[in-house]
Amino acid sequence: MNTSSFRQRFALQRARLLRLVLPLVLLVAATGSGCVSTGTNPISGNTRAYGYSWEQEVKMGTEADQQIQQQYGVYEDEELQQYVDRVAQDVLAESHMRRPSTPEKFRNTEFHFRVLDSPIINAFALPGGYVYVTRGLLAHLNNEAQLAVVLGHEIGHVAGRHASKQAAKQQIMQGVLMGGAIAGQAAFGGDVAQNVMGLGGTAAQLLSLSYSRDNERESDRLGVEYATMAGYDAAEGADFFTSLKRKSKQSGQSIPTWQSTHPDPGQREDTIIKLAQEWAQKIEGSQTARNQEAYYASIEDIILGENPRQGFVENEVFYHPDLKFRFPVPSGWQVQNETSQVAMIQPNQEAYVVFRISQANTPAAAAEDFAGQKGLTVVERQQETVNGRSAYRVLGEGQTQQGQTLRILSYFIAYDGRVYAFQGMTTAQQYGTYRSALERPMTGFDELTDRQKLNIQPTRLTVRPASRAVAFRTFVDESLLPKDISATDLAIMNQVDLDETVEQGRPLKLPK
């Protein structure tokens, strides 16, 4: 989180939050989509059924892009952003989206490539030309050729209009509920679910559209084709997929892992190598670029793992060094820290508290906005002080579709020129049980003055050659590793085994 937003990923499963709030969600209107329609496939040129027109895909992608940037944050390294964009544009230039035979509306579509500030290993695309890679994924690639294959794969999803295909298959019409999407209309009749929860609207709708294995196979083929035509040794992509197989599925992430969003249709590494060989034979000239040195130079100093500057938990206290605040976490509750909010979840998912920055100028105005939501009945509203700071407390109730009564306890606190909002939710029946836990972070919010916590810094990556031919673990200084990265994780990041002997002079990605 910088001075206006959090920039750290979820640490737990969003699904656990959704279990509590999904009963609030009514029907989600698919943005701009009235019915399944026919359209052109940029790859084949054939006409088929799509959930959206191309114009709608571009509009939806643009809307979702703003939500993605706000929710997850763009990594603040302009040189790295420019490097990824340059490679991406070279690969894009060889894709179906830029070929003379492709209809003009596709060829004229502007693409946007962004590096997200997340340690999760992932890349994904949104309709209309929006492609994202995380800093976590970049740390796990070993050269530019691997990056080109990943980017080509995601460009393939856009060119294949895969999200729109899936929308048509699911018969998405106006008023159809998207699984897991919190798009705004709650049983309260207003925006309570969206306001309390996180990512919503178009982005949630699009990210809920899982690609089929046929979509993935096509994107694998296209990724290799586009990268090879751009001059890269696309077979290098196989090593990255091998590393992914070694990485167990990580639980609890706001952006799913590459593995969960890109199901493996068998021996993917072998397929990548075979496809690369076939394309290399079809194309005249050299397709051997790997550009490892340039790639390593681009990721030098990239943040490894979580960034404590954007918030961390220690001994059941949440600290935010950049914004200089702290608050206690209910004992035993799990914490999710993302770009726009921090969520604390009771172990059985029976209650939770969400913390974020309010858009209101005063606690009174924030309380008024919250209390005025349609369908919310105010039980209590009063002015308070929290550790000497002006605050408002509001307790409200609302009904779910199933007739269950929920209680939402909110505190709005003025601090350092901003208004911070806490919102806790549980059932009315369990409110007495969880009231003290809900209030704990709200009434414990205070200034952070501990110099050790204020001065904490993230772990960064450096690339240096192996000084001798020994096992990789010899070069690992575990005291330098962040808490969320193990020695084995670092070996996977380098695409070697922990006890594998690395040759002298081989560049190694290590913490510093």
Image: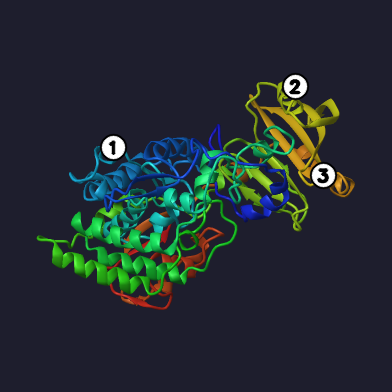
416 displayed left or right of 258: right
Per the rendering, the mark at residue 477 is: none
Q: Amino acid at mark 1?
A: Lys
Residue 7 visible to the viewer = no
Q: Secondary structure at mark 3?
A: loop
Instruction: Assess disc 1: are there few (<14), some (14-19) or many (≥20) residues with their C-alpha within 10 Å of its C-alpha.
Output: few
- Residue 275: % across, % down: 25, 68
- Residue 120: % across, % down: 49, 55
| First reached walking from the N terminus: tag 1 or tag 2 | 1
In the image, 331 versus 108, the foreground residue is 108
Tell me: residue 130, above or below residue 258: above
453 displayed left or right of 211: right
Q: CA distance from mark 3 to mark 1?
A: 48 Å
Quarter residue 387 falls in:
top right
| First reached walking from the N terminus: tag 3 or tag 1 | 1
| First reached walking from the N terminus: tag 3 or tag 2 | 2
Q: Which residue is mark 2?
A: 364
Q: CA distance from mark 3 to mark 2?
A: 30 Å
